[in-house]
Image: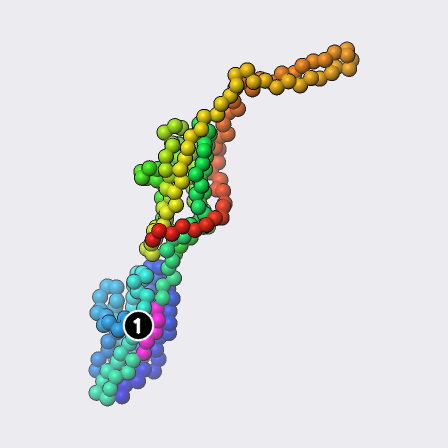
Amino acid sequence: MTEQKTAFKDQTKEPNGTIHLECVAEGKPDKVQWLKDGEPLTDGKHHHIDIYNDGTCSLVITAVTTKDTGVYTCEVTNKFGVTSHSGKVTTAFSAPVFLTQLQSQDVPDGYPVSFDCVVIGKPPPTVRWYKDGKLLEENDHYMINEDQEGCHQLIITAVLPSDMGVYRCTAENSSGITATKILILLTNAQYNARQQSFLSVSCKKHSESVDLCQDRSVPPPPPQITTKILSFLTCASINIS
């Protein structure tokens, strides 16, 4: 009866990696078959099967995806009988998960606003921003930032009435897709043209009182965005895979 001298162990692989499973049979096998979850595999580009004269039987799985997770069996047959060995293959994949949930905001006209989120997943997800269903691209009006820690940021440099709407952030990888969305409402700051503040100062030298007036009829200019600095937040997860 053919016996397997060495056999593969359980394996876990990163996305797009290669898995190499190998058994060495003692004695020349008449037939070698590889199975996944009990179903026979055929030699091809994704599953490459080799049988060598020294009794080595190998299965190479290329460009690993979540579909490759399962129990693999090497089944060896000769005139004396059948022997087999099985091992589990898992892929280190996870669907994207938002660790922050975007919050709707009321934004003054002409002011900048930023939206931040942190998303995780393996492989690292592709993140996209949308406004009312339309994909946003970075330009002078929209700044899009990201870093290696999964922090993503959308900045509107100066909010306009046309910026009102629903904003959505999606994250997608080979394991799934998830999204979070917010609503922007525009507010107009009201200023009193005659609004003033007074400070009375007594001048000791001449014993006179002087009133200093600060005119607040003109609103302060909105802050300017000069650098691309990410804000780091933590919050709840949303998953719609």
Q: Which residues are magenta?
A: 85-89
Question: Is residue 38 highlighted in magenta?
Answer: no
Tell me if 217 is positioned left or right of 31 in this view. Answer: right
* Front-most of residues 227 and 101: 101
**Residue 18: percent from left, percent from top:** 33, 64
- Please provide percent x and percent y for residue 101: 44, 46
In depth, the one of 87 and 115 nearer the eye is: 115
In this rendering, position of residue 1 left or right of residue 211: left
Quadrant assignment for the N terminus: bottom left
Residue at image location 34% in from the left, 74% down from the top: 87
Does any portion of residue 36 appear in the rendered image? Answer: yes
Q: Assign the magenta stretch its main secondary structure.
A: strand
User: Residue at 77% of width from left, 11% of height from top?
Assistant: 206
The spot of residue 102 in percent (x, y) is 43, 43
User: Visible in this render: residue 28?
Assistant: no
Disc 1 crowd rating (10 Å Cα; few below 14, some 14-19, many 20+) is many
Above/below status of 76 relative to 158: below
Q: Is residue 170 above or below residue 214?
A: below
Give 105 or 177, whichever is nearer the viewer: 105
| Rendered position, 92 above or below 207 | below
State the residue position of label 1. Answer: 72
Q: Is residue 240 left or right of residue 148?
A: left
Taking depth in this image into account, of 40 and 219 the one nearest to the observer is: 219
Which amino acid type is shown beneath numbered disc 1? Tyr
Circle 1 sits in a helix, a strand or a loop, which is it? Answer: strand
Q: Is residue 151 above or below residue 164?
A: below
The residue at 46%/50% (across/down) is: 236
Q: Position of residue 123 (x, y in %)?
A: 37, 55
